[in-house]
């Protein structure tokens, strides 16, 4: 079995001004909850893409930084064959969708009333 990362980790900084969110209202529990929602979505998507026979690890982490939120998403595939470019492109698309879900959840929960 081949083990290792399928590519670079995905880290995106989400500026609070861009989203109109009040970062001061966001707690660790909120970030953990959003990360859990995103992880479940990615697990479902990856299982649909790969099937049940392949192993993978998904890490979604959110942290509060000055001026915004940093979203970290990593998917590690453990496969018997090297992933095809089309498979990697599909995984990349699902990661982009996951990062958009983070953005949408932040806006839904923490939209600043002054914006």
Image (tube, rainbow, N blue to C red):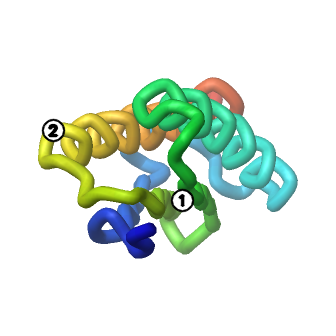
Q: Residue furthest left?
A: 85
User: Percent from the top left, x then y, of residue 41?
Assistant: 60, 31
**Location of residue 25 with respect to 97 vertically, above or below:** below
How many residues crowd around disc 1 within 10 Å: few (fewer than 14), some, or many (20 or more)?
many
Query: For this view, does 37 lie left or right of residue 86?
Result: right
Which of the pair 46/24 is nearer the observer? 46
**Where residue 86 is drawn, which disc sits there?**
2
User: Percent from the top left, x then y, of residue 5?
Assistant: 38, 71
Query: For this view, does 92 lie left or right of residue 47?
Result: left
How many residues crowd around disc 2 within 10 Å: few (fewer than 14), some, or many (20 or more)?
few
Splitting the image into 4 quarters, where does residue 77 fall? bottom left
Splitting the image into 4 quarters, where does residue 49 fall? top left
SS of the residue under disc 1: strand
Query: For this view, does 83 lie left or right of residue 3?
Result: left
User: Percent from the top left, x then y, of residue 81?
Assistant: 30, 57
User: Percent from the top left, x then y, of residue 31?
Assistant: 73, 52
Residue at position x 50%, y 29% in the image = 45
Q: Is residue 112 visible?
A: no
Q: Nearer the viewer, mark 2 or mark 1?
A: 2
**Where residue 69 is drawn, which disc sits there?**
1
Which of the pair 21/95 is nearer the observer? 95
**Where residue 111 is drawn, which disc sits there?**
none
Splitting the image into 4 quarters, where does residue 37 fall? top right
SS of the residue under disc 2: helix
Residue at position x 58%, y 59% in the image = 57
Q: CA distance from mark 2 to mark 1?
A: 30 Å
**Location of residue 115 with respect to 66 vertically, above or below:** above
Q: Is residue 72 visible?
A: yes
Going from N to C along the chain, the mark reached first, 2 or 1, is 1
Asked whether the beta carbons under mark 2 and mark 1 sit within 8 Å of each other, the answer is no
Residue at position x 36%, y 62% in the image = 10
């Amino acid at each position: 079995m081949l083990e290792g990362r399928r590519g670079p980790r995905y880290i995106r900084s989400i500026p609070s001004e861009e989203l109109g969110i009040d970062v001061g209202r966001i707690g660790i529990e909120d970030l953990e909850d959003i990360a859990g929602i995103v992880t479940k979505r990615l697990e479902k998507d990856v299982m649909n893409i790969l099937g049940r026979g392949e192993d993978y690890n998904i890490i979604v982490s959110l942290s509060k930084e000055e001026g915004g939120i940093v979203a970290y998403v990593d998917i590690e595939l453990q496969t018997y064959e090297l992933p095809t470019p089309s498979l990697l492109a599909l995984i990349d698309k699902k990661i982009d969708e996951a990062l958009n879900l983070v953005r949408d959840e932040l806006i839904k929960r923490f939209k600043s009333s002054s914006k």
